[in-house]
Every structure is written in structure tokens, then in C-alpha cells.
Amino acid sequence: MRRPVLRDRPWRVRPRPALRPLRNRAQRVKSVLGPIDTEYMAGTIGTSIIDAGGAASSPQRAPRRARRMLTLFASLAAVLALSGVLTGCETTDADRGEVISLINASRADAGLAPLTENVELNLKADGWARQLRDACQISHSRLADGAPANWQKLGENVGRGGTIYQVHGAYLNSPGHRRNILDGSFNQVGAGAVWGTCNGYRTVFTVQVFMRG
């Protein structure tokens, strides 16, 4: 029986203001459905503003009109995506729904609120899942690329395996991936699940993108 490898590579954006890589960790799991590989990444960002008196304050807010325009554009993008104008997603509604349902079921078991599906994060996750499938390997996206402009914290799990359920189980068995799924500060999620054949195995590549907005 093949011994699939579960890989995780934590990478965190250090709050205020720099990025800092953390150490790598690896873990093995067993499977009869082919190789499982997963990686996770999580980070936060926030710019501290130092006022004239030298005290740190909250991140500076955009002017009210700019905030209204950002909200309007985000709403319009969501409507266009839901109406099918934004096309090109390879992830089916059923597969995306399974990924998100498994996430929220795990959160419910831990007494956490469900995550709200975010269209922009879905597009980001699907695009990255397709790249992973085409390369037949897993790696991380640039966290902020394709994320909504109002994000405050982002996290990402990427993995591949024989089924969506199998990959989710591997996530839960890895401390880093599980921490992303059960992070109570996240309130939105996007998901991609793209199928391909790698090394003779029918394989699904899943991407989970978490956000606090």
C-alpha cells in the first residue's frame, strides 16, 4: 500500500507590518486512494498609525465615500459572479459546496460559527486549484492576490487526494491546517476543487481560502 505524504508549510504575515516565515513541519498519513499532499498558510496584516503624540492607533480607515465605492464594487462583483457573467471557474457547485460544508461541519463540532461563502475568494481558490492540478504538485498562492480589498486576516489550505472528504480528513489531522479551519477569527471562506490525473491517480486538488473581513 502506498504511503501518502502530508506536508504542511506554515507561513505567517507578522502583524504590523512585516512578513516572517515560520519553520517547516511534515507529517505522514495512510491512504488507499493515492497520495495525499497538503500545505497550509495563515497570516494577518494591519498597519499601525503613529499619531503626533506618539501613540499607536487602529489602522487608518478610508474616507467614507471611498468605503462606499469599495462596497458598491464588491456587491456588483458578487452579483455578476452569481449571475454567471464572471465565468471560467472549473470547480462545480457541488464540489465547492462539499468543501465548504465540511469546513462548517468541523467548526460546528468545535462550537464555532459557520463561515460565510465569499465569491471573490471562490474565484481565487478555483484559479489556484487549477494551477496546482496543471502542475501536479501543491504550493501556496500569494495570500493577498485576488482577495477582497477589505481583508484583515487571511489563511490558506491546499491539498490533493483521492476525494474531497479524504483531503479534508488529512487537513484535520494536521495541526496547522486544523488551526486554519477552526480559527474563530475567520468569518468568510472561498473554496476550489479541481480534478485531474497525476502519477496515474485520479486526483482532486482542493484550496480553502479563509478571511476575516
Image (spheres, rainbow, N blue to C red):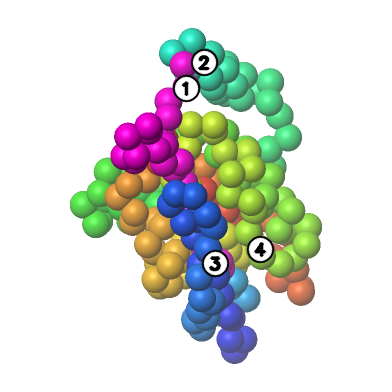
State the residue at coordinates (34%, 39%).
Answer: 54
- According to the picture, the residue beneath numbered tag 2 turns out to be 66
Quadrant where the image shows the C terminus = top left
Which of the two labelled residues, at mark 1 and mark 3, occupies the earlier sequence position? 3
Residue 62 lies left or right of residue 58; in this view the side is: right
Mark 1 in CB contact with mark 2 (< 8 angstroms): yes
Q: Is label 4 or label 2 in front?
A: 2
| Residue at the far front in the pictured view | 53
**Nearest to N terminus: mark 4 or mark 3:** 3
Considering the numbered disc 4 on the image, is that residue within a helix, a strand or a loop? loop
Q: Which label is found at residue 139?
A: 4
Residue at numbered disc 1:
62
Earlier-in-chain disc, 1 versus 4: 1
Decide: few, some or many residues near mark 3? Use Cα within 10 Å; few <14, some 14-19, many ≥20.
few
Mark yes or no: residue 41 visible: no
Which stretch appears magenta?
A: 38-63
**Residue 21: mark:** 3
